[in-house]
Amino acid sequence: MTQTTTQTGSGTKPGQMTAVMRAMNQAPGPKVLRVGVVLGGKVIEERIIKQRTHVTIGPSEKSMFVTPNKNVPPSFRLFELVGDEYALNFLEGMSGRVALKTGVTDLASLKSQAKKVSFGNTQAFQVPLSDDARGKIVVGDTTFLFQFVAAPPPQPKPQLPASVRGGFVQSIDWTTTIIAAFSFLLHFGAVGTIYSDWMDPLVNDEVDVAQILESVRSLPPPPPVEQPKETDTTPTQASTAQAEAPKPSAGASAAKGAGGGKISDARASAIANELAQLDMQMLGALNASGNATAGVLDRGDVPLGLLDNAAASGAGAGLGGIAGLNLGAAGGGTVRPGAAGGGGLASIGDTQAATAASAQGAVKTVKGPTGSANVGGAAVSGGNVANASSVVAGMAAGFRRCYNRGLQSDPTMKGSVRITAKIGPNGEVLSASPSGGGGLSGEVISCVVARVQSAQFAPPEGGGATVVIPVSFVSQ
């Protein structure tokens, strides 16, 4: 920062760097302060104070330059702005040299010319500086170099490239876009003009309709279309099928003769069974006990008075072989229908209960075996259950039903089982597990367990109890 001078003859001239700096075009306006910090022979910081303001040093973080020297106040104004000019303030323990207009002078010599100012409890010396002043100030181990230089040119504001800053509208090639737009407009307009009807001549609809009608009238009549007569074979086939069907009221021989084809054996057997049933119904209508309509119809309000009167009258038929019918009654008296030959026809349609003699050979229903369930005393443990005996006794009917269902598949089944039921605090059955059960099927045991699980006991004392239920099953 000090100017290097070279002795040539009797005069002096500035150093080479100073000459180059003086030869450069200086920017107009006031100069700015340039401060460098040297520590241990190395420049550790350099700053150009672009805005004229106070330059402070000291151990405080608020100082512009932080120095660890304890003899300096926390924020000491080394360069103080007085009006529009800078002034140098230095303390008693500082040293250095300053180049002023009057020449290069050390700080010790400037004390007599400096103005004394106070910063709190600290007494300092103040020397005004011009724009040509420069020098160095030593504060402990730190050296401050300063000089006034021309203000650097303002830095342009950083901007993004045009390709990034420009939006979609700015990236459009308007020349090409306008040409393409007019080209599309011209082509689509031409196509629309070709397919539109606004350029077609006007057409008189009435004249066109009249011409169409006239052309239709002048058309020759179409030749007649000959439609062949179709023979309908469906009624004939239906009538043939009706003729082939046998009549239910005729005999087997008559039905066979009426049909054009042969009847199968199964169909013939069915017709014979139907005829036999009709004969049995006719014979049952001749019963002597009650009206004739009681065995044929469910309701007696049918107007069959003539048949009822004939059945209730005392008239009968004499002995004889009318149509080969042998009544087989003794004596020559009158015979009432259905009352000849020790029951005769009456016994066929009689709906009353049969006597012991006539009941011989009748079909009897064989009743299967039944079983009984013997429930032993309930053994309660863990807590007293008030109604344990009554609830267990009420399960006997359900156990018996389970056993009877099992006897339908195995009539010889018998045995015993023990059901251990755990009772909850509210009397419900939490779980039921069987033990034993030899001779009983799994279906019977599961049914008995399900019946126990559906039981409801009184709340046990102590919050829980266990009930053991022994059940034995014996067939009768």
Image (cartoon, grey):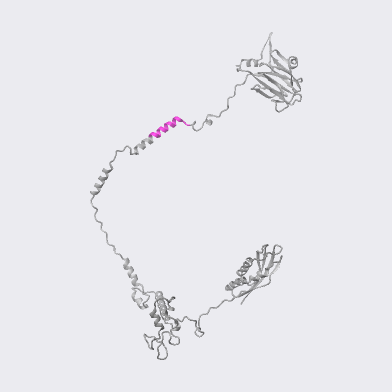
Question: 251 or 37: which is nearer to us?
Answer: 251
Residue 42 visible in rendering: no
Q: Main secondary structure of the magenta part?
A: helix
User: How far across and how far down the image is residue 321, in percent?
Assistant: 37, 87
Q: Residue at x 40, y 32 (%)?
A: 182
User: How far across and how far down the image is residue 449, in percent?
Assistant: 63, 67
Question: 259 or 285: which is nearer to us?
Answer: 285
Up/down of 194 relative to 404, above or below: above
Which quadrant, please, contains the C terminus? bottom right
Which residue reaches farthest bottom?
Answer: 331
Residue 405: image quadrant is: bottom right
Question: 206 or 128: which is nearer to us?
Answer: 206
Q: Is residue 233 left or right of residue 142?
A: left
Residue 274 visible in rendering: yes
Q: Residue at x 25, y 48 (%)?
A: 216
Question: 443 or 357: which is nearer to us?
Answer: 357
Q: How many marks?
A: 0
Which quadrant, please, contains the N terminus? top right
Q: Which residues are magenta?
A: 172-186
Residue 401: image quadrant is: bottom right
185 part of magenta stretch: yes
Up/down of 409 relative to 99, above or below: below
59 part of magenta stretch: no
Up/down of 431 relative to 116, above or below: below
Which residue reaches farthest top?
Answer: 10
Q: Is residue 344 left or right of residue 240?
A: right
User: How far across and how far down the image is residue 59, in percent?
Assistant: 73, 27
User: How far across and how far down the image is residue 287, in percent?
Assistant: 43, 82
